[in-house]
Image: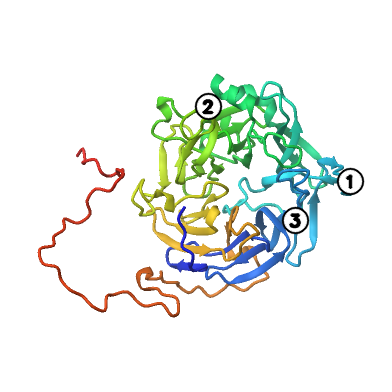
């Protein structure tokens, strides 16, 4: 990705007539859970509250974590999952998943939570009309880590992904472990061999193989497929996606079996129109009550992921699928038709030459809004933006906060209605016109336009000609 050294931060575009206005919450790097309005005004900060991610609940409550496990002993393990009120008081907490005795630390219970969770009452963790998450009762679905050995996968230690359901008192009432379903995942022999040799070993903590790396889990909720008799789409069933394997899957809540799946191999003819989904995040069904309900919405990162045959980009077959741009895909999960998409082409960039300009090879998300717009977190460069069904940019925000690695990354952002925050008056909505970048200058810089001009006789141009690399629109129309 090419970035300028100087660029505006905060809110840069806002069209109140076309945007779905509300508050947006995200984890500001090395700061805490930050709530902003449509102008980018920072209306509330839960300082120090970690967010993997942060989610806002009705009444001004927010979910997050108080601490992470020491990276010397664990990988992306959050110590707990907590719900705090507007004043930062912890009103609910879960940590009793595993008793941890790390050297140099007091023994303690930890959740080992990571990447996602859902509170009952709402299937996806963002605003859905008529489906408010519960704030004083109910169960919570939590994605957690567990260290396991499974010789079917590898002879090396594995960092497995488990999904827990806990009640309000913190009791674990349901559990699903990914490694126990290896035979259902559809790896071919080449992929199994690569995975066995190196299950994506991460040299944090125990040095275990982060073989699947599930980064989202949601409940399906009521949907048209189950209404039509398709038991795979039972409202209680869960959908998850694995970043390292390019897999999106639905599991039967009662049996634990995988009953629907995309990936890990997209080379079959029925997937050819989709292209390869690579390193994806935040795969979920759009809930009933929102435009596109029942369709699969996913941030298809690109980057590098998967296990399989070696190629020039992957001489050992690990992370063997590669693409240097991102896509948002809305897919009918039965027909696999792409119903809507946002790619570099829809963003207005010449593909594939400039496709990298919409690109986050890790983290990121997409949320369907009640007016049909989509809120997109292009996480790697801290960009949160909203587009219409026609792909018009109607709101944009760039996080000004950087972490110790000099990145302003935003894992995932959520838009909520003003009414969910009764502690604040509804803000004034004032348009932000896009900057004329061609004429924007920092203080002291000269404007555009030559002071001295001469005309060279005989010059001529046909306009844009061929570039060094073929663009996707170079072929003549077949009409």
- When the figure is inspected, residue 210 is found, relative to residue 410, above or below; the finding is above
**Residue at the extreme right:** 106
- When the figure is inspected, residue 128 is found, relative to residue 96, above or below; the finding is below
Question: Which label lies toward us, 2 or 1?
Answer: 2
- When the figure is inspected, residue 399 is found, relative to residue 73, above or below; the finding is below
Residue 211 placement: quadrant: top right
Question: Which label lies toward us, 2 or 3?
Answer: 2
- Location of the C terminus (image quadrant): top left
Q: Where is residue 115 in the image (x, y as percent from the top left)?
A: 66, 46
In this figure, which residue is indicated by the disc labeled 1? Answer: 107
Q: Is mark 3 on a helix, strand or loop?
A: strand
Answer with mark 2 or mark 1, whichever residue precedes in sequence: 1
What is the CA distance from the residue labelled 1 to the residue labelled 3? 23 Å
Q: Residue 83 carries which label?
A: 3
Write the residue at 85% across / 44% down.
102
Crowding near pointer 2: few (<14 within 10 Å), some, many (20+)? many
Q: Which mark is residue 308?
A: 2
Crowding near pointer 3: few (<14 within 10 Å), some, many (20+)? many
Q: Is residue 22 in view?
A: yes
Q: Is residue 254 in view?
A: no
Q: Position of residue 127 (x, y in %)?
A: 58, 54
Question: Which label lies toward us, 1 or 3?
Answer: 1
Write the residue at 55% across / 45% down.
287
Circle 2/circle 3 CB separation < 8 Å:
no
Q: Position of residue 248 (x, y in %)?
A: 55, 35
Q: Is 429 positioned to the left or the right of 57 in the image?
A: left
Write the residue at 42% across / 60% down.
393
């Amino acid at each position: 990705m090419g970035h300028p050294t100087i660029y505006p931060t905060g809110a840069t575009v806002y069209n109140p007539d076309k945007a779905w206005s509300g508050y947006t919450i995200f984890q500001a790097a090395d700061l805490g859970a930050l709530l902003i309005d449509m102008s980018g005004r920072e209306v509330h900060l839960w300082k120090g509250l970690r967010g993997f991610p942060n989610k806002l609940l009705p009444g001004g409550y927010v979910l997050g974590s108080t601490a992470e496990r020491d990276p010397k002993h664990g990988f992306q393990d959050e110590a707990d999952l907590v719900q705090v009120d507007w004043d930062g008081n912890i009103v609910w907490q879960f940590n009793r998943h595993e008793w941890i005795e790390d050297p140099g630390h007091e023994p303690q219970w930890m959740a080992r939570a990571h990447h996602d969770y859902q509170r009952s009452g709402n299937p996806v963790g963002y605003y859905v009309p008529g489906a408010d998450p519960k704030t004083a009762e109910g169960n919570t679905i939590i994605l957690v880590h567990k260290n396991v050995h499974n010789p079917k996968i590898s002879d090396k230690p594995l960092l497995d992904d488990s999904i827990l359901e806990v009640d309000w008192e913190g009791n674990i009432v349901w559990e699903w472990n990914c490694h126990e379903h290896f035979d259902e995942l559809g790896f071919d022999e080449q992929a199994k061999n690569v995975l066995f040799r190196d299950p994506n070993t991460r040299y944090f903590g125990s040095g275990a193989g982060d073989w699947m790396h599930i980064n989202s889990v949601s409940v399906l909720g009521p949907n048209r497929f189950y209404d039509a008799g398709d038991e795979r789409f039972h409202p209680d069933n869960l959908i998850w996606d694995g970043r390292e394997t390019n897999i999106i899957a639905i599991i039967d809540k009662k049996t634990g079996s995988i009953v629907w799946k995309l990936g890990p191999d997209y080379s079959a003819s029925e997937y050819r129109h989709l292209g390869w989904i690579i390193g994806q995040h935040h795969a979920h069904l759009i809930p009933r009550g929102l435009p596109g309900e029942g369709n699969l919405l996913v941030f298809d990162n690109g980057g590098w992921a998967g296990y399989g045959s070696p190629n020039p980009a992957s001489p050992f077959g690990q992370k063997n699928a590669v693409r240097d741009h991102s896509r948002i895909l809305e897919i009918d999960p039965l027909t696999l038709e792409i119903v809507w998409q946002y790619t570099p082409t829809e963003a207005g960039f010449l593909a594939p030459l400039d496709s990298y300009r919409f690109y986050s090879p890790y983290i990121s998300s997409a949320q369907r809004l009640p007016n049909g717009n989509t809120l997109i977190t292009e996480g790697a460069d801290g960009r949160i933006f909203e587009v219409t069904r026609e792909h018009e940019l109607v709101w944009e925000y760039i996080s000004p906060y950087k972490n110790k690695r000099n990145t302003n990354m935003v894992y995932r952002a959520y838009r909520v209605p003003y009414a969910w925050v009764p502690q604040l008056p509804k803000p004034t909505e004032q348009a932000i016109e896009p900057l004329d970048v061609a004429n924007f200058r920092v203080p002291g810089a000269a404007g555009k336009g030559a002071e001295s001009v001469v005309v060279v006789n005989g010059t001529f141009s046909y306009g844009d000609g061929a570039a060094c690399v073929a663009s996707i629109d170079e072929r003549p129309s077949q009409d």
